[in-house]
Amino acid sequence: MAALRVLVGVKRVIDFAVKVRVAPGGAAVQTQGVKHSLNPFCEIALEEAVRLREAGAATEVVVATLGTKASQETLRTALAMGADRAVLAELAEGAAAGPREVAVALAALARRLQPQLVLLGKQAIDDDCNQTGQILAAILDWPQGTFASRVSLEPGAVQVQREVDGGLETLRLRLPAVLTADLRLNEPRYATLPNIMKAKKKPLEVVPAADLGVPAGPPRLRLLQLQEPPPRAGGEKVESVESLLGKLRHAGRI
Amino acid sequence: MALRAGGRWARPGSALRGRCSGPRRAGDAPRHRHLREALRKIIDKEINPFVDKWEEEGQFPAHKVFKILGQAGFLGVDKPTEYGGMGLDFSYNIAVAEELGNVRCGGIPMAIGVQAGMATPALTRFGSHELKKQFLVPTIAGDFVACLGISEDGAGSDVANIKTTAVRKGDEYVINGGKMWITSGSQADWMCLLANTSKGPPHQNKSLICLPMNLPGIHVAKKIDKLGMRSSDTAQIFFEDVRVPCKNLIGEEGKGFTYQMLQFQEERLWGVATALTPMETIIQETIDYTGQRKVFGQPVLHNQTVHFRLAELATEVELLRSLLHRAVALYVEGNDVTKFASMAKLKAGRLTREVTDSCLQFWGGMGFTNEVLVSRFYRDLRLMSIGGGTDETMLSIICKYMDILPRK
């Protein structure tokens, strides 16, 4: 079978179960000592890539991330789930990296590794940008299939079923292409202990982000302020629509 | 945080506490980290959502749960790779045990302990290749549920006094007698049975036999109705002229007692490891509850007697953890850690009672209900001082090592 490499981009995020706190200063979220994990949508993207390889449709799965040294742990988890090798585009501590920077790094890796498919999660659960896949496809000038809920490879093409506002849309894209994974694409596997042990020996390459053309300048977006939502006040049940409207009017809400 | 099914406690802080294992604890080995995270996922998804139901039903589905754990590689962590194990050292076993402390009951980790660490060590070390293929491989894979048949109605601490016999007739053993307190006994596919195979000195006349549980003459007489560990089925079993091939003997005849003694250190260290996280969980849930429960206008937690006591208990938990890790490190290096393992087990038995008792008191009336975790662990962890070697047995062992046990 002709070599078909899949590049999966992943992100290390604060674990979904953590109660996030605003850090002192009010311009960032508390990350020190807080549990981090592999972004759930990235996990789904990775699972899809591994399944493609197991089905014989792909020959190699490379997982990559743009992050600090701590992201190596996340890459090891990805290797334990079945990726063949990993690349860390390493940022300095404290360097911010948004969708544009990630897309630049992945584009550089794509030019190096020549994958036929790039799989990403549709968005990260920390910033919910939903931009990286789209920007990456634009940089590479590749077709994109976002919010994928089903993926099947054909010779030279990929058929993607997308979850869109109106329902489900199916596209056929010429390879190479960029896809982003939605929730219902698959159910990620548990990393088994044998795979966790094997993952320790799989190659993990570290490349300075600057080598991939990631701009080092100040971020284009500056976070002005972060605050927790006001504590939830008690609710009130009403008996009728009229009563509801009256109360809302009285509270100045309408 | 109340039990999931109850759903009374949807408070963000406490509700999320139970799910998130938090940042890496000081002292947790980095090499165990991925193992613990992977196991935690399985616990959160496949075990904890069903614990309330299984506790009520008096049994958890061992075949189902063990298959999931077996497939993920958690039932044979320190077993040889040629039989499907991971071939890792005992510290990995202990990491599994500590992580299992996140299960919201004591019964299931206890049953996993039997499956992964108590029914199989002698078989692994002394069993024939054929016997290992027949029993060890499926046990590690999670296809067979294993149980351990040592204790009897008339012999618990006094193991040498068991009465079950396995008399050689031709190329079979004929087994008569009975066993008591058999964890997973009503679900097991096979039992690692200790029986008298000859007359003679009580420490040298016993043997370990791999006993398939579907043989005629084996009666699972009853499931014992216990104070705690209710999701783990505990059986009383009788044997009436049960015939098993002689090739099912593990190792040498007459060595059974010795073989079983050899694995006690591991069994006790495992037990201690499974008790640590529940104690921490209870302390934290007690902090969460008393932090918002007001009495006479202020949170219960603000009373010095409460927060000071919780600090004391947390201190002791850390001390016990340190002793455990020290013993495990020495054991992995090849040392005999019987004294430390016995000390740790003794302390665990007593500390679990103190932690659950003090915390239950701070919960007040709510602590006395079945809707909270503290009362379940109060019941479950009470077994620590009795099962796997009583406190009294531990004290005797320590005295022996201190050379202060009166000689007969």
Image: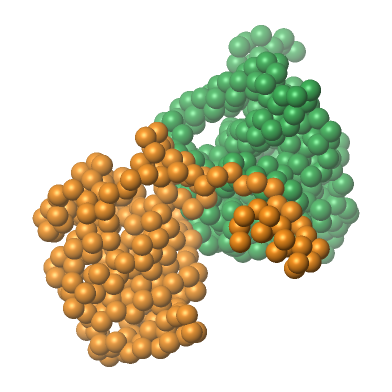
Q: In which quarter of the image is the N terminus of chain A?
A: bottom left
Q: How many labels does the image show?
A: 0
Residue at left offset 33%, top offset 76%: A179
Q: What is the display colour for chain A?
A: orange
Q: Which residue is drawn at 37% across and 35% down?
A: A25
The reply to whether residue B392 is in sight is: yes
Among the 4 quarters of the image, the one containing residue A3: bottom left
Q: Is residue A138 left or right of B67 when viewed as pictured?
A: left
- Where in the figure is residue A43, as x and y percent of width and height? 41, 63
Residue at 42 percent of width and 49 percent of height: A14
Q: Please say if B307 is above or below A71.
A: above
Q: Residue B26 versus residue B69: which sits nearer the camera?
A: B26
Q: Which of B229 and B356 is in front in this view?
A: B356
The quarter of the picture where the C terminus of chain A appears is bottom right
Q: Position of residue A49 (x, y in %)?
A: 35, 72
Q: Residue B360 or B229: which is nearer the viewer?
A: B360
Residue at x 65% of width, y 46% of height: A233
Q: Which colour scheme is used?
A: by chain
B31 vs A249: above or below: above
x and y, in percent, of residue A85 in the image: 26, 61
Whether residue B108 sits left or right of residue B28 in the image: it is right
Chain letter for the green colouring in the rendering: B
Q: Going by the image, does B193 lie left or right of A205?
A: right
Q: Is residue B129 visible?
A: no
x and y percentages locating residue A119 in the rendered image: 32, 71
- Seen in the picture, residue A26 relative to A142 is either above or below; the reply is above
